[in-house]
Amino acid sequence: MSPGSRCGNTALQMWNPETAKDKSSFRNFTSGPLLDRVFATYKLMHTHQTVDFVRRKRAQFGGFSYKRMTVLEAVSMLDGLVDESDPDVDFPNSFHAFQVAEGIRRAHPDKDWFHLVGLLHDLGKVLALAGEPQWAVVGDTFPVGCRPQASVVFRDSTFQDNPDLQDPRYSTELGMYQPHCGLENVLMSWGHDEYMYQMMKFNKFSLPPEAFYIVQFHSFYPWHTGGDYRQLCSEQDLAMLPWVQEFNKFDLYTKCPDLPDVGALRGYYQGLIDKYCPGVLSW
């Protein structure tokens, strides 16, 4: 299938999030055909994502001994993954990677590293293909070790059985953190963001700091979109926030049933991979 015209995917046409699709139709967590699946995923996530769980997962996957493969081999693996937390799409995640990358490429033609971030950002979801449950891989992230704030998806109906919220160390607004400690010192719920960020560091990707930051926090919607958790942020976090928000325009609003012609795009992205993260990598 060639790139779809409904998403503005012609070679010379600038993708425009204002016109591609009504923004209000995205991230609808109150109705829709996928709502039951989405709610069930978040219920499991918000029950089992605890300080202890996150620490165990970071230790389990921190050695990057799961698999050796190239970036494009990882992209191809996502042909077999449909994100159960996403209320907007029901097609494989590999297409989403190219949609985001191409949206960024058209809007920011001079920032090739940013194009590559679009392709890379969700590759940590290979964890789901390694046998991890989707609630430990996908979905919005949030800090563990403190009380969830108002804009966390399904906050009022999914955290009742999380043991950390019965622990006085973890159940206040700041929990185990100091004010403005910086998000680099916050233990985020475990998933593809943190895994991919750590994988990029382990394999010494030669991308700018903004790229690493976007990958690490792109699913932290309660922060970059909800405006919560500012009490944990450092000046560095606030300086990086506009980059995450700019990326989010493409991560969210390029979702479209017209799927990209992946074969026609591989050559360009292979060139970026060769520049910034070549060869067979440790996952």
Image (spheres, rainbow, N blue to C red):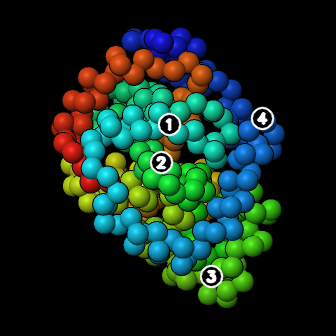
Nearest-to-viewer mark from 3 and 1: 1
| Mark 4 and mark 1: Cα distance apart in space | 21 Å
- To which residue does mark 2 refer? 129
Q: Earlier in the sequence, mark 4 or mark 1?
A: 4
Q: Residue shown at 36%/41% (left/top)?
A: 74
Nearest-to-viewer mark from 4 and 1: 1
Q: Residues within 10 Å of mark 3 (few under 14, many from 20)?
A: many
Disc 4 is placed on an element classified as: loop
- Residue 78 coordinates in the image, percent (x, y): 46, 38
Q: Check contact, mark 2 vs mark 1: CB within 8 A.
A: yes
- To which residue does mark 3 refer? 170
| Mark 3 and mark 1: Cα distance apart in space | 37 Å
Q: Check contact, mark 2 vs mark 4: CB within 8 A.
A: no
Nearest-to-viewer mark from 2 and 4: 2
Q: Is residue 110 visible?
A: no
Nearest-to-viewer mark from 4 and 3: 4
Q: Nearer the viewer, residue 72 or 28?
A: 72
Nearest-to-viewer mark from 2 and 3: 2
Identified by mark 2, the residue type is: Leu
Q: Nearer the viewer, residue 13 or 143?
A: 143
Numbered disc total:
4
User: Which quadrant does the C terminus fall into?
Assistant: bottom left
- Numbered badge on residue 33: 4
Q: Residue shown at 75%/57% (left/top)?
A: 154
Disc 1 is placed on an element classified as: helix
